[in-house]
Image (spheres, rainbow, N blue to C red):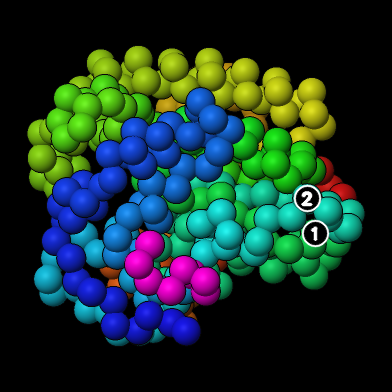
Amino acid sequence: MINKKYPKINPSYFLENMDNKALQSSLLNSLFRNEFDQTWSLNDPYKSMNVGNREFTVAPTEARLPDNFKDDGSVIYKYNSDWYRSDDFNKNKTSKFHILFNGCSETEGIGGNIEDSWGKILHTKFSKKYDVGNFYNLGRAGSGWHQVILDFFVYEEKYGTPTHYFVLLPNIGRNFLWSENNLGGWDYHQKYVDREKISVFFNQKSLISIENQKNDLMDFMISWKIFEKYCDSKNINLLVSSWDFAELENICFMRQNKSVFKMNEEDASNFLIKNKKTLSLEKRDGHKGRSFHEWWAYEFEKEAEKRWGQW
């Protein structure tokens, strides 16, 4: 049963109605308890809905959108037993290759059906050439690079080591910050560099200075280099890029993280222009449309073949 008529809620609903215990324990599950963060799924209106099927027509991030957002029933959000938009995770895999995807809301596919997300598109491409098994996706709206690493370790402990790990990073200015608001404790915040072009879209609390961004970049490069070493030790093929071209430019310019590759902006323009009549540029909530996801999948496929040839 699909919850076609999802109740409209105000942006503060999830914070006002958080169970104290759930907020304190679940948000940091991946760090302290080797469990996935399931905070939003533990609270109303989700826990009181038909969680047996775990199918909805609006995601939590969409529920926070302005009143002019319309649930037209065209998008189905189906979550697995761990509350990820993925096939059910499985310990007993029989496929030759075990591939895993991760990222933020773009990888979760917010705003559209999962078939329109870059990870699912890439998985479909690989399925035609390789024995890759089911579609396993850890993408979660709001996630940053810390959670991409932490959730990977939880997944590996529970469901085994993947042969390939594909990650589309968001901006790196996402971090655990101590907050005295609400119940106190750590929250995970999204911060954006205070550049002229984007500052008009965010309030000052969501912006960080260029100086702080430089510190965040250094933290990322060191931490990611350690994670790359870990993946090397486990023979995991790690391939990473970002939809944030400014962040990607900085990371690639430093030449410290070998798993990160730069997608070509000129190629993107040509690809989007070529497909603009047949593929959407934007989803119903403002996330990137099918054209962008097709291009991301194309770039990952091309880079994978360049690095590893035929698997």
Residue 91: which disc? 2
Compared to residue 86, the image places residue 187 above or below, namely: above
Task: Identify the residue at image location x=22%, y=27%.
Answer: 184
Label annotation for residue 132? 1
Give coordinates of residue 232: x percent, y percent.
76, 26
Residue 88 spot, x, y in % from top left: 66, 61
Q: Which mark is residue 2?
A: none
How packed is label 1: few (under 14 Cα within 10 Å), some, or many (20 or more)?
A: many
Residues 232 and 246: in front is: 232
Q: Earlier in the sequence, mark 1 or mark 2?
A: 2
Whole-angstrom CA distance, mark 1 to mark 2, is 14 Å
Instruction: Classify 300 as above or below 86.
Output: above
Q: Amino acid at mark 2?
A: Lys
What kind of residue is marked 1? Val
Q: Residues within 10 Å of mark 2 (few under 14, many from 20)?
A: few
Name the residue rendered at 52%, 64% in the picture. 79
Work out whether residue 32 can be spotted: yes
- Report if residue 64 lies within the magenta region: no
Estimate the x, y position of residue 148 in percent, counting from the top left: 53, 37
Residue range (magenta): 47-54
Tell which of 79 and 33 is nearer to you: 33
Query: Is residue 253 in view from this perspective?
Result: no
Give yes or no for residue 50 being in the magenta stretch: yes
Against 86, residue 245 (above or below) is above
Could you tell me what secondary structure mostly forms the magenta stretch? loop
